[in-house]
Image: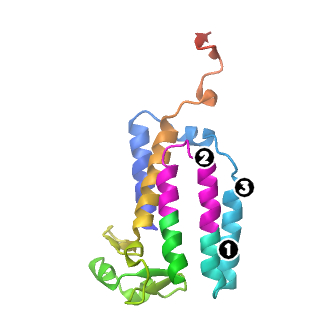
Amino acid sequence: MSLVVVVLLIALLIGWAAGGAVGRLGGLPLNAPQLVVAALLVQLVGAVAGGPVHPVGLVVSALLVLAFLARNRRLRGTGLVATGLLLNAVVIGANGAMPVSADAAARAGLALEDLVADARHEPADEATRVRLLGDVVPVLLPRRPEVVSPGDVLLSAGLGQLVVAGMLTRGRQALPERVRLDRGSVQP
């Protein structure tokens, strides 16, 4: 997904320009990271098994990531990521694959046939449920145009917000060793 990459690069630049540091991202206090690992494994099994197992794997994977995000909801950006994943899970669950708009593909300069060549996507038609949540947003990136869903847009925005906030956050690990916090006072 080119949109996510572009948003993350912009977020890194914004975080750096605002005085943040990439190293602070490793200090984000994440709860239950094993849920993300489980989500990746479920998605991999669904992709390898194919058929009706694939959309079930995507939905279960999204639900595991939503549980992870709920456990980390105090971090900026996780609400947008969770909402984006939920919207994607709804449309995929309702259709068995992500529906792709022929009109959006044409506006992005892409062939619909290329976009629906894998089992994860299907052409949107009159039988498509919750069509507005499918891949309906043309993204005219240079050299890498694409069509994304509203969920993908929210997910990208949330990841960008998480990166900027993480780069600017000064946790206890980010304080110099010679500085200690003791009941709100700073002591050398």
Q: Residues within 10 Å of mark 2 (few under 14, many from 20)?
A: some
Query: In this view of the protein, can residue 5 be seen by the observer?
Result: no
Three-letter amino acid code of the residue under disc 3: Gln
Left or right of 164 in this view: 73: right
Marks 3/1 in contact by CB < 8 Å: the verdict is: no
Colour mode of the rendering: rainbow
The front one of 66 and 148 is 66
Q: Marks 2 and 3, how far apart in space?
A: 13 Å
For the residue carrying disc 3, how many other residues have a C-alpha within 10 Å: few (<14), some (14-19), or many (20+)? few
Check disc 3 and report its element: helix, strand or loop.
helix
Residue at 69%, 58% (x, y): give it.
35
Asked where in the image residue 119 lies, by quadrant, the reply is: bottom right
Q: Which mark is residue 34?
A: 3
**Three-letter amino acid code of the residue under disc 2:** Asn
In this picture, residue 176 sits left or right of residue 162? right
In the rendered image, which residue does mark 1 sit on?
44
Which quadrant would the C terminus be assigned to in this image?
top right
